[in-house]
Image (cartoon, grey):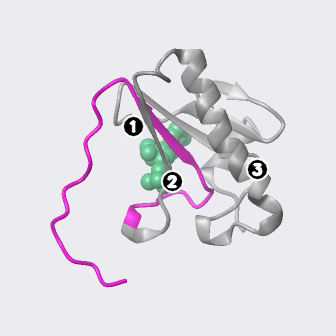
Amino acid sequence: MTDTIFTKIINREIPADIVYEDDLCLAFRDVNPQAPVHLLIIPKEPIATINDIKPEQREVVGHLFMTAGNIARDMGFDEDGYRAVMNCNAAAGQTVYHIHLHLLAGKQLGWPPYTDKMKV
Ligand code: AMP
């Protein structure tokens, strides 16, 4: 897998507004926020998409969700509520091929309208 912009953020080659870091993951503010709080939580180990998650990577993926809950508690929006979501490939609008959990909070979150039928 080739390096993405997120590898550069992990390696501190480009700046980011980092709010949390541990051995397995990094959380930073999205440059194009879709809510008052919009963080990206990424594994330090690069995984391109959800489709590429291997059995031995279950723990790190679970860690991303646990970290989302911990950050929500620390920032004080755990009770109000938030969204933790991961896009996969083009139909979901994935643009960076290093999995990332979007953590959105601070407003009433809508859901995109269903306007078309998609065969699966
Ligand atoms: P996705 O469309 O699910 O792949 O989400 C990628 C997200 O990364 C988008 O919400 C972008 O705004 C965000 N993003 C891209 N480059 C950066 C960056 N350098 N720092 C912070 N967020 C970024």
Residue at numbered disc 2: 86
**Which residue does the image show at 63% across and 57% down from the upper left?**
98
- Check disc 1 and give the amino acid type: Asn
Q: Secondary structure at mark 1?
A: loop
**In the rendered image, the vertical position of residue 85 relative to residue 56, given as above or below:** above
Q: CA distance from mark 1 to mark 3?
A: 25 Å
* Dot label at residue 60: 3
Q: Tell me where residue 45 appears, x and y as whole percent.
A: 78, 53
Which is nearer the eye, 59 or 98?
A: 59
Left or right of 9 in this view: 75: left
Query: Is residue 41 visible to the viewer in this orientation of the structure?
Result: yes
Q: Tell me where residue 36 appears, x and y as whole percent.
A: 36, 24
**Which residue does the image show at 64% across and 47% down from the upper left?**
6
- Check disc 3 and give the amino acid type: Val
Left or right of 16 in this view: 55: right
Query: Is residue 49 visible to the viewer in this orientation of the structure?
Result: no
| Label 2 residue near ligand 1, CB within 8 Å | yes
Q: CA distance from mark 3 to mark 2?
A: 14 Å
Left or right of 7 in this view: 79: left
- Check disc 2 and give the amino acid type: Met
Task: Pick whichever of labels 1 and 3 is earlier in the sequence.
Answer: 1
Task: Pick whichever of labels 3 and 2 is earlier in the sequence.
Answer: 3
Do the residues bearing badges 1 and 3 touch, measured as CB atoms within 8 Å?
no
Q: Which residues are magenta?
A: 92-120
Q: Secondary structure at mark 3?
A: helix
Residue at numbered disc 1: 32
- Occupied quadrant, residue 75: top right
Q: Tell me where residue 64 appears, x and y as whole percent.
A: 66, 43
Q: Residues within 10 Å of mark 1 (few under 14, many from 20)?
A: few
Q: Residues within 10 Å of mark 3 (few under 14, many from 20)?
A: some
